[in-house]
Image: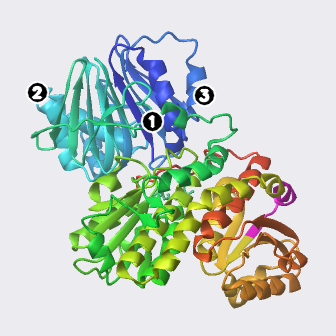
Amino acid sequence: MCGIVAYIGHQDAFPLIIKGLKRLEYRGYDSTGISVHDNGLKIFKKAGKVAELESSVEELTIKASVGIGHTRWATHGEPNDRNAHPHFSADKSLSIIHNGIIENYDTIKKELLSKGYTFQSDTDTEVLITFIEDIKKQNGGDLEQAVRSALHAIEGAYAIVILNEENPNQLIAARKGSPMVLGVGTDEYFIASDATPIIEYTNEVVYLKDREIAIVNREDFRITNIDDVEQTPYIQKVEMKLEELEKGGYEHFMLKEIFEQPNSIADSMRGRLDAANGTLTLGGIYEYSQALINARRIIVLACGTSWHSGLVAEYLFEEYCRIPVEVEYASEFRYRNPVIHEGDIVIAISQSGETADTLAAIELAKSKGAIILGIVNVVGSSISRVTHEGAYLHTGPEIGVASTKAFTGQLSVLTMIALSVAHKKGTITQTRYKELLVELARIPAKIKEVLDNNAVVEEIAERFKDAKNFIYLGRGYNFPVALEGALKLKEISYIHAEGYPAAEMKHGPIALIDEEMPVVFIATRDSSYDKVVSNIQEVKARKGVVIAVVTKGDALIPALADYIIEVPPCEEALMPLISVIPLQLLSYHIAVMRGCNVDQPRNLAKSVTVE
Ligand code: AGP
């Protein structure tokens, strides 16, 4: 949830860490802070964004070649200067940054209070570093051993880096549950929550595993597990390019990522879909492809937008593969004592690959013998490493907190997997299979057509930017799109919005309809078109204001609805890849017109690494 960055080497650490924190700010932006060893241990921190910290110290001369930095998403203790990270230990000999939650911090705190320790903040993190100081005092000053003992005693998730007053030539880092990457440079090392702050300096990284500790010195590093057993680091190359992390001339990352979708979807199909020859190759699902084909059922695990793409997958796998699918909120699944059989197929969907609830649900399913296939965007992320096999989206880094190109990337990959399984199972005819592959290959161009219509959506946004509520309605494959449209508007414009299956309206929500309620219908031409037309008439009969996403050339609905957004005709099963685009744009424009911080919406973070 938080972003951590650390550096040891020959460069000026403070500005380097500031730059790294800006790259990670999408992970949390409640407060920021940096600790460096500049003739002693120092901490500079404050509530608010990285830029505010930067301007608050610009008069100071800070000279350091080792430091740790943090951008926070508050869990324990409200977002203010006191609770901002880093935190000192009681005698200020140690400073720490932490991403995660120490669940038994209160018990430890009580013990330390009884020993006379006092605390400056309400955070679990300050308790941890004070606990380490206390153990170090008792073990003759061995910090590494003190860290090990403390990590054995705590419960919860952590990615921590510790700086020691007595030894400015070393950083100690450790992780469990929360992500951590070590960047291997020439006589310099970088530690961060993901590779984005590192790739400017090196593309050689080590992804730390759970319960690993990295002892990083100026000229070398070593990795052990929590029981002090040496681990052989696996150094891998990151393929990410720096310009992918820039806005590329767009005002916001979200807008850039919306307009990237013709390319990002083409990238998700590259080397996989050959429509001309009617073939699909999914190299990442090989050993378990037969198990997938023979699956009695598929359980989808995900959260948020990824859960919505899981719902579309349910329609795809049931229609084309005739395999029953259950789409589970990972956070509920992990505590529901679900029935899982040996060999059940679980598909875990996650953009970040770090979502704690999805990770924990995977661990539960795995412990009961299920086969876990991952659909993940971030290369090298935890979920990509704990799943049996899977497929990367290849849509490139997604920086905007509101997921857009990852959603359509997930739909593209899930569609390719479903069609590939259906083809191998023989539950789809060769002709239909080839038709759908050709249609799939046309999606990037069709999305381009929708994006060219951006101005129409912007006008509609102007009309509804002050609305208090919205309802989104769809049927069949467009029902999950209605949910996704509502989520996008909620998370970046803070307008209350609900998504529903259109037919559900009569069972309650239609009571909300009046001339103040904008209702967005995803009403493209498909097998439930006539039903949707009746639902529109029901809403119009109650003076609701209808915005309808329709298939180009539709003459009927434009006569009924108040506002129309046209999209090109498309196969029903592939329509979510297109019909979601106007909804992404609508939420974007409304949020911008309301002056909201579109890329870093309040109270949110890009990857939810705590439960
Ligand atoms: C979507 O816009 C949100 N950022 C959020 O709902 C997100 O989809 C959810 O947290 C799941 O994240 P993941 O795909 O990285 O697991």
Position of residue 391 measured from the top left corner of the image (x, y, whole percent): 38, 58
Whether residue 314 is visible to the viewer of this picture, yes or no, is no
* Contact between labelled residues 3 and 2, with CB atoms less than 8 Å apart: no
Residue shown at the point (53%, 12%) measured from the top left:
60
Q: Nearer the viewer, residue 101 or 456?
A: 456
Relative to 125, is 21 above or below? above
Left/right placement of residue 246 relative to residue 317 reads right
| Residue range (magenta) | 459-470
Amino acid bearing label 3 = Glu
- The circle drawn on residue 52 is 3
Q: Is residue 114 magenta?
A: no
**How far apart are the alpha carbons under marks 2 and 1?**
38 Å
Query: For residue 469: magenta?
Result: yes
Query: Does 71 appear above or below 431?
Result: above
Left or right, residue 256 beside residue 37: right
CA gap between label 1 and label 3 equals 21 Å
Of the numbered discs in the image, which one, if any, rests on residue 140?
2
Tell me if 523 is positioned left or right of 384 in this view: right
Pick whichever of labels 2 and 1 is earlier in the sequence: 2
Q: Residue at x 46, y 50 (%)?
A: 394
> SS class of the residue under badge 3?
helix
Residue behind mark 1 = 196
Mark 2 or 1: the one toward you: 1
Residue 14's place in the image compared with 229, above or below, is: above
